[in-house]
Image: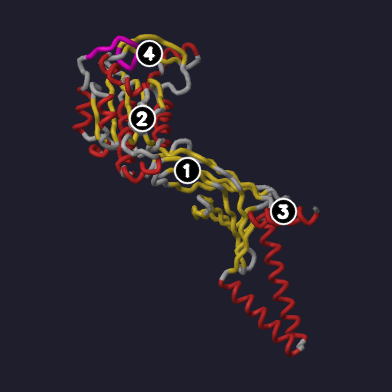
Amino acid sequence: MRFERIRTALQRYSHYRSLRLTHDGTRFILLTLAVGVAAINTGNNLLYLLLAMLLSLIIMSGILSEQCLKQLEVRRRMPEHVFANTPTTAVLSVTNRKARLPSFSLRVMDVVAGAAVDRGVHLLHLPPRLSSFHLYPLLMTRRGPYRIEGVKLLTRFPFGLFIKAATLPIVSEIVVYPEVKPLPERLKLDLLTLGHDQAVSRRGQGVGLHNLRWYQPGDDSRGIHWKSSARQARLIVRETEAEDQQRVTLAFSTFASEGGEAETVASRFPEAAFEQAVMLTASLAAFFYQRAYSVRLLVGREEVPHGLGTAHLYEMLRVLGSCCPEAAPASVPLPDTFLTLRERSAAGEMTILVLPWPDARVSAACQGVSSILDGSHWL
């Protein structure tokens, strides 16, 4: 039982520690072996002393490098909102918890999908009981969940003979939003003229004052009534009467109606077309957000209700960033939210359907909506 615990501890240690020779270290080991063979063959005391010195340097290298990696606390702070193909910045802090001994020559790398990714973070000297903060750039080329599994610390201290590494399981998970691009001018004109003559009598982002209320998290800061806020010593938001066509529903079909089994969806429908449609839907959401529309988003079987403000926009982008194609055989009915899109358009609300690929069943079920857009055509 005792040996079993020792073996388990060694396995855990080896999982988080690794050691490999450098080029200089390889030459040093070969030199040590040569001196050892010569000492044994000749029996020369000077060669034995030289061999002892070389072996002591190897032992000292292991001990000192281990001291550099011990009692280090690493924290990573990821940006809250990350867009695909848009540079952003993360913050990494390294704290030396040792009471007296500093750490030297540290490289800090992220571990993504089991591989170490060099972020260009190097620490030459980290004194005891002090912290070092580093900003490093991030660029995600694809939308969707992104997971950093840990942090890898490497050091060549003290002699550069070995590279000792320690892996810390510090996990960071974010959802990368789709890339948002400006809409073509012709599409902008078509969207702004859709339902232009349909007036809506309700609260919205128009000109006429509708109401004053307390500020809530996620409200658009442009709606703050500063004079009333100064009198009350608390943020107050003005609600205005909506003008023409201030509500819009964006419906993005993730269904592969002709795909049959789920395994064949990726092979029958191109991934590029789907990603292009996701990007178009995200760009439409940002377009209507900038114009203070109340936006509702349908993504497959998931729904984000009508809302305004920055927090609502990020929630829609999060849903779009996480979506993926799903098989929808003819025997499985479409969600009721898609089947009732026509009624919403008839009631005066702008309803836009985005299709990543031609789908006769979805198009037939959503006949009468304000607009049906081909996702691969506009961006």
Question: Separation of disc 2 and disc 4 at Cα?
Answer: 46 Å
Q: Amino acid at mark 3?
A: Thr
Residue 302 in view here: yes
Marks 2, 3: nearer the viewer? 2
Marks 1, 4: nearer the viewer? 1
Question: Separation of disc 3 and disc 4 at Cα?
Answer: 63 Å
Question: Separation of disc 1 and disc 3 at Cα?
Answer: 31 Å
Q: Do the residues under discs 2 and 4 have CB atoms within 8 angstroms?
A: no
Q: Residues within 10 Å of mark 1 (few under 14, many from 20)?
A: some
Whether residue 43 appears in magenta in the rendering, the answer is no
First of labels 1, 2 by sequence position: 1
Q: Quadrant of the C terminus?
A: top left
First of labels 1, 4 by sequence position: 1
What numbered label is drawn on residue 239?
4
What numbered label is drawn on residue 146?
1
Q: Amino acid at mark 4?
A: Glu
Under circle 4, the secondary element is: strand
Q: Which residue, given by chain and number where applicable, does mark 2 sit on?
A: 331
Residue at 47% x, 14% y: name it: 214
Residue reaching furthest to the bottom: 42
Q: Amino acid at mark 1?
A: Tyr
Residue 131 in view here: no
Using the image as rendered, state which of residue 315 and residue 7 is in the foreground.
7
Residue 159: percent from left, percent from top? 63, 68
Question: Separation of disc 1 and disc 4 at Cα?
Answer: 38 Å
The residue range painted magenta reads 198-207
User: Residue 201, relative to residue 132: is it above or below?
Assistant: above
Under circle 2, the secondary element is: loop
What numbered label is drawn on residue 8?
3
Residue 313: percent from left, percent from top? 39, 28
